[in-house]
Each structure stands twice: as structure tokens, then as C-alpha cells.
Amino acid sequence: MSDQLDTIIIGGGFSGIAAARILHKADKKFILLEARERLGGRTHTKHFKDGKYVDVGGQWIGPTQDRMYELAQEYNVSWYETYNQGKNILDLNKTVRTYTGLIPKMDVASLINIDFLLKKLERLAKEIPIHSPWTAKKAKAWDAVSLEVFVRKNCFTSNCFKVVRAGLETVYACELNEVSLLHALFYIRSGTNLNNLLSIQDGAQQHRINGGMQTLAERIAESFMTSIRFDSPAKRIIQYEDYVTVKGDHFSYDAKNVIITIPPVLISAIEFTPALPLYKTQLIQKLSMGIVGKVLGVYDKPFWRDQGYSGQVVSDEHAPFQTLFDSSPADSSYGVLLGFCIADRAREFFSKDQDERKTIALINFSKYFGETASKPIEYIDHCWADEAWSKGCYAAYYPTGAWTNFQDALAKPTDHIYWAGTETSSIWYGYIEGAVRAGERAANDILIAS
Ligand SMILES: Cc1cc2nc3c(=O)[nH]c(=O)nc-3n(C[C@H](O)[C@H](O)[C@H](O)COP(=O)(O)OP(=O)(O)OC[C@H]3O[C@@H](n4cnc5c(N)ncnc54)[C@H](O)[C@@H]3O)c2cc1C
């Protein structure tokens, strides 16, 4: 066996970096193979020449994401509150209305209906065993239908359906008919509760990392940078009795163990010898990635705040984006409006060329915030489905039947291969916190086994 290593980590997103950090601290010999030229995976901070930056990938952290706060503290990376003051906007039935607080201005019947539906989802999610959703009492029934079936059954007004749909699409990053109800409930349970997933204040959107989310990934990796190989996609993995070989176009490494942290959809691009267990390969074929595009306008200042707006918008299907947020930096030295373009709306929007997309986006931003919104100093949009090394985001979702038929097949170790990545985490599945926890779990499993 040449080039003796303890572990090869595949993927330099938060999961791979979290695994590497543990192995580095334990003095283990490892390398991390990353297909891209950068770290961070589905987090990506884009920098402009004048020092401004925007997060085009994962950006928020919030309560119960304990590992994220602990890591930020350990690596001296600070965080700040997401701007959350002023009037919000609801764009419903081609009418733009403003409201303050949590309750949108709409007919009372729809408001009662929204409250009823969200509480019902919340209640059902509590019945999910977080580490084994397929063992829930009603798992089979919930896994036999999509989230859309549930939402339609429990929406009694069309306004309720429109608002709930926009909110849930923003959470799940897919059409509601694409995801199993069981997965939707598991996702809520995994992220503590629905209120947490939907909220800024006391929720998953509460804090941003100063300097951008990728800064944290890079800071953690500083002490083991020499163990990282960029531009190194793993293409073949061969398992022998007591070691594994990982090959790419221009390299071949041997190690006792491998940790794979890449999105499930990309696993099938790797050739495994021997082949992976049938349950794992079949499940991998079923898991699709969500589709989200971030659409960002950068301005001299967050001018909408002066007009009393929070920058937050929820829009029905007449608008190109489900939701908008104020994504400006902590010191407000410039302003950033962020639109989430998701599922069918993303497929339509990103089928157009960039000039057309820019025109549509800026017309939409100015509809809410006036003429100034049509003149950003920078415009940038980014569709993660176009990225060869992600193929979508925020994460893979389980369609009907996948949880109950395949159970824990994704995360189960296969001989010398340990599986990580946010999709293998029971806690904060789909989020950066989940990625970190999964990477740490895989690395600790290796340490325990060695
Ligand atoms: C637009 C968007 C918004 C989001 N918002 C949030 C948010 O606000 N908060 C939050 O918590 N989460 C958010 N997420 C989700 C979050 O970013 C992901 O859950 C998390 O980053 C996943 O980390 P990971 O390490 O599991 O996977 P990845 O980040 O995908 O890392 C996998 C790595 O593997 C590499 N790779 C792939 N194939 C190979 C190969 N064959 N060989 C070597 N390397 C390979 C990839 O290049 C990548 O770097 C968002 C994601 C997106 C894209």
C-alpha cells in the first residue's frame, strides 16, 4: 500500500471540513479531496473588487444550531442579527400590501386557515422519531403522499394555499408535490420546529456570519490546508480487505478509511468496486436535489430601511421570487436585496438569459421598493442546479416511498467507507449545522473504530 493514510475525506464543504478538523486534532494522517478550486461547497461568498461581498449559498444560522455558534466562537468569527424591522410586504393576487409583525394583511378566514395548517404540521412533526422517521406510527401513510396532498387537504381558502405554498417552497426548495409528507415532517423535526424554520427572530434566519459564511469554512481549514487537494474530484473507489484506494484523473491515494461528504446525486458519478449495496444505490437514484437561485441587488445603502421597509416580501406565483430578504452586511455600509427563486419559478427564470433575468428581477424589486431598486451597483444571480459539484440545493429531498422503503440506507457505513454530508444528519438535515454534525460523527466513528 503506497502513501499510507488513515483517512481520505471526499468533499471540502462544511461536512468534510468538520470531519478533517476532528482528525487533525486527533493527529491522524488524512487528505481531503475537493473537486472545486475552493472550500465551502454549497456555501459560497462572492467578493467584489471594492471589498463588498454577498453569500450566494448558505448564509444563516439560528437557535439550536449549537455547533455553528461553537465553531464561530472557537475560530474568532463573529455573527450579527439579520435586519428584521419595519414593514413587510405580501404580494398576493397581483396586489402589494404592507404589514408589520408576523400577521400579513389578508382575509381573516385565510389567516385562521394558515394558523391551523402550520400548527397541524407542527403537531404531526412531533410524532417523528428524529433518528428513524420510517418508524413513526403513521410513517407508511405519510410517506405514501406528497406534502402538496396534505396542504391542499388542509387549505380551505385559495389565499391560504398561495401564502403557505410560497413559504413552504422557500423551506423545502422544491414543488410541494415533489416531496413526501413524511420527509417534510422529518425536516421540521430535524430543524427543531416549523416556527424555527420559518422565522428570522429566534429562528433559522436569525444570524449571519461577518465576512460571509465561507469565511468560517476557510478559517477552520487554515491549520490543515496542506492536507487539502483542490481540483481533485474522486472518480473511483476500490475497497480491499484492509484498505481503500481513491482514484482521480491524476492521482491515486490509499487509506484505511474514506469519508464521503458529497451530495447524494453526485455519488452515482463515482465508480465503486465492489459495487455499493443495492439499498444505497437505489436510494441515491431516488434522491433529487432541490432547486434554488439566489437573486441579489447590491446598492449604496439599504435605502428601503429609510422608507420603513424590512426588505422582506412573500409573493404568490404571479411574481418571479417566493420570498425576499434584506441581506446587507452588519455595518449597513451597503445594501443587499436577496430574492429566493425556487422550484418551478427557478426553472422558468433561469431558462432565460442573464439580461432578461436582470430586467425581470429589477422590475420586481422596484415594484416593492421604488425606482431606486432598479439601479443596483451590482446585480448577481446564481442557480445552484447549474453547478456541476452541487447539482442543486439546499439539499436532497426524499420523494414518496423513499424513507419507508430505504430507511437509513444513505448514512449506513459500507466497510471502510463512512458517509457524511448534511443529507446524512438527523439533526438539522439540509442545513450547515447538519453538515457539520454529520462530518464530526463520521470522523468520531473512525476514531472509535481505530
Ligand atoms: C442557495 C442556498 C442557500 C442556503 N441557505 C442556507 C442557510 O441559510 N443556512 C443553512 O444552514 N444552510 C443553507 N443552505 C444549505 C447548506 O449550504 C448545505 O446544507 C451545506 O452547505 C451542505 O454542506 P455539505 O458539506 O454537506 O455538502 P457540500 O457543501 O455540497 O460539500 C460537498 C463538497 O464536495 C465536493 N465534491 C462533490 N463531488 C466531489 C467528488 N467526486 N470529489 C471531490 N469532491 C467532490 C463539492 O465541490 C463540495 O465542496 C443553503 C444552500 C444553498 C445552495
Image (cartoon, grey):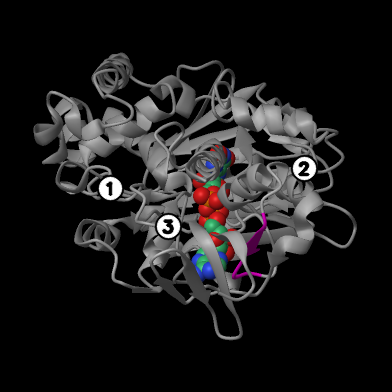
Q: From the Cβ of disc 1, is ligand 1 less than 8 Å away?
A: no
Amino acid type indicated by mark 2: Gly
Q: Nearer the viewer, residue 267 or 417?
A: 417
Q: Secondary structure at mark 3?
A: strand
Residue 99: image location, x then y, percent: 53, 21
Compare residues 396 and 228 and report the one nearer the observer: 228
* Residue matched to label 1: 398
Q: Is mark 2 within 8 Å of ligand 1?
A: no
Segment tinted magenta in the rendering: 29-36
Is 31 magenta? The answer is yes
The span from disc 2 to disc 1 (Cα, nearest Å) is 36 Å
In terms of sequence position, does the residue under pointer 2 or pointer 1 come before the other? 2
Quadrant where the image shows the N terminus: bottom right
Query: Within 10 Å of the Cα at label 2, are there few (<14), some (14-19), or many (20+) other Cα atoms?
Result: many
Query: Quarter of the image holding residue 61?
Result: top right
Q: Nearer the viewer, mark 3 or mark 1?
A: 3
Judge whether residue 367 can be spotted in this image.
yes
Q: Quadrant of residue 229?
A: bottom right
